[in-house]
Amino acid sequence: MQVSKLLRDRVHTRMEGIGLSRGQGFILFRLGHEGGLPQTELARQTMVRPATLTEALQRMESAGLVARKTDPADQRVSRVYLTPRGREARARAEAVWNEVESELRAILSADDRAQLVTLLGKLRDALAEEGR
């Protein structure tokens, strides 16, 4: 938990430096991989409550980073898209993540990193199973 908090704080500080909250950066990142995501799916992928995501999207929409549009096939579904400004912000956020990742890679050897990824994957999978 200590490592998680320190990493979260570092990313948060760097994201603030480019005008984004930590959560906004992650939302932009997810939308860059899959544009036009249903809002419910985006909440699942970012692991936040739908109400929390709605608040973040409202702020991001006001800032011109995202646009929400009703799905033409299902009027109950709201899809979220990056705007041109959102794509620019996403590129800045990705640069922040790459920078932090490089700093972390420099701390551990390649073997240590491979072992850490394996162990964290086991923990994630076990915790995900318990939550179902």
Image (tube, rainbow, N blue to C red):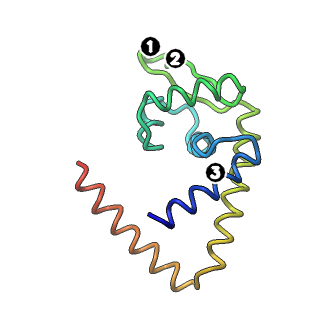
Which label was assigned to residue 12? 3
How far apart marks 3 and 1 lie (CA) works out to: 35 Å
Q: Position of residue 49 (x, y in %)?
A: 41, 35
Quarter of the image for the N terminus: give it.
Answer: bottom left
Disc on the earlier residue, 3 or 2: 3
Q: Amino acid at mark 2?
A: Thr
What residue is disc 2 on? Answer: 70
Which residue corresponds to the image point at 76% horizontal and 40% vertical from the top-left?
A: 88
Q: Quarter of the image holding residue 51?
A: top left
Q: Is residue 128 above or below residue 28?
A: below
Say how many tags the image has. 3
Instruction: Report the side of 19 relative to 58 (left or right).
Output: right
Q: Amino acid at mark 1?
A: Gln
Badge 3 crowding class, 10 Å Cα cut-off, few under 14, some 14 to 19, many 20 or more, is some
What residue is disc 1 on? Answer: 75
Badge 2 crowding class, 10 Å Cα cut-off, few under 14, some 14 to 19, many 20 or more, is few
How far apart marks 3 and 2 lie (CA) works out to: 31 Å
How far apart marks 1 and 2 lie (CA) works out to: 6 Å
Q: Amino acid at mark 3?
A: His
Residue toward you, 93 or 20? 20
Which residue corresponds to the image point at 57% horizontal and 40% vertical from the top-left?
A: 27
Helix, strand, or loop for circle 1?
A: strand
Disc on the earlier residue, 1 or 2: 2
Q: Quarter of the image holding residue 110?
A: bottom right
Q: Position of residue 25 (x, y in %)?
A: 63, 44
Which label was assigned to residue 21? none
Instruction: Report the side of 126 relative to 17 (left or right).
Output: left
Which residue corresponds to the image point at 29% horizontal and 59% vertical from the top-left?
A: 127
